[in-house]
Image (tube, helix red, strand yellow):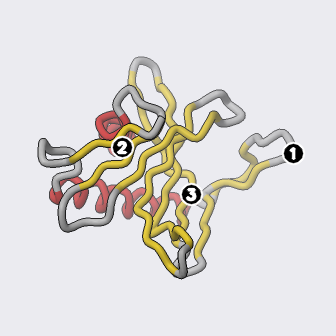
Amino acid sequence: MKIYQHFATVLAQLLGSDTAVRISVEGYMPLSIEAIGTSADGNRLIAICHYGEQHGDLMRDPEMVFELFTHGEVSAAEPLSFQNDYLGVLQEVYRYDEADKKTHVNTRLKAELTSFARMWFQNLRDQGFLGPQAVRERLA
């Protein structure tokens, strides 16, 4: 649970009070963070993504979607999906029914995405995306 709390803290720092932002740090691909709606349970969904370009098309490299929730007084963010357009990969932790309710969980993928997100968020910190040298552009 502590790692999910950490994810929520980092996402809140990156997004701030905005709905969508692009953060640039010299020498690195810009980072986009966007509130993309709510889950069937009413929890906020946040997408975080680096974009590249191929033949004029934007390519996710990668994108992860997180579901923010509260557990008692604590905010947490759970990874739901991973997408990399260059590799043609889309992975989703849950399967959903017709009402968009979670029905099955891929626990192995959930652990892999948690590990990847932990490493990615540390890299973002090390690269300066959470520091004063980061340039924030409010998109919405």
Residue type marked 2: Phe
* Secondary element type, mark 2: helix
Are the residues tagged 1 and 2 within 8 Å (C-beta)?
Answer: no
How many callouts does the rendering have?
3
Tell me if residue 2 can be seen: no
Dots 3 and 2: beta carbons under 8 Å?
no
Outermost residue, left side: 132
Closer to us: 140 or 113? 140
Q: Residue furthest front?
A: 56
User: What numbered label is drawn on residue 98?
Assistant: 1
Position of 11 with respect to 125 (left or right) is right
Task: Residue 1: name its quadrant.
Answer: top left
Looking at the picture, which amino acid does disc 3 mark? Ser
**Mark 2 lies on residue:** 7
The image's mark for residue 81 is: 3
Query: Considering the numbered disc 3 on the image, is that residue within a helix, a strand or a loop?
Result: strand
Based on the displayed image, in which of its 4 quarters is residue 11 positioned? top left
Q: Residues within 10 Å of mark 3 (few under 14, many from 20)?
A: some
Residue found 50% across the figure and 79% down from its top: 54
Few, some or many residues within 10 Å of mark 1 (<14, 14–19, 20+):
few
Q: Position of residue 32 (x, y in %)?
A: 41, 51
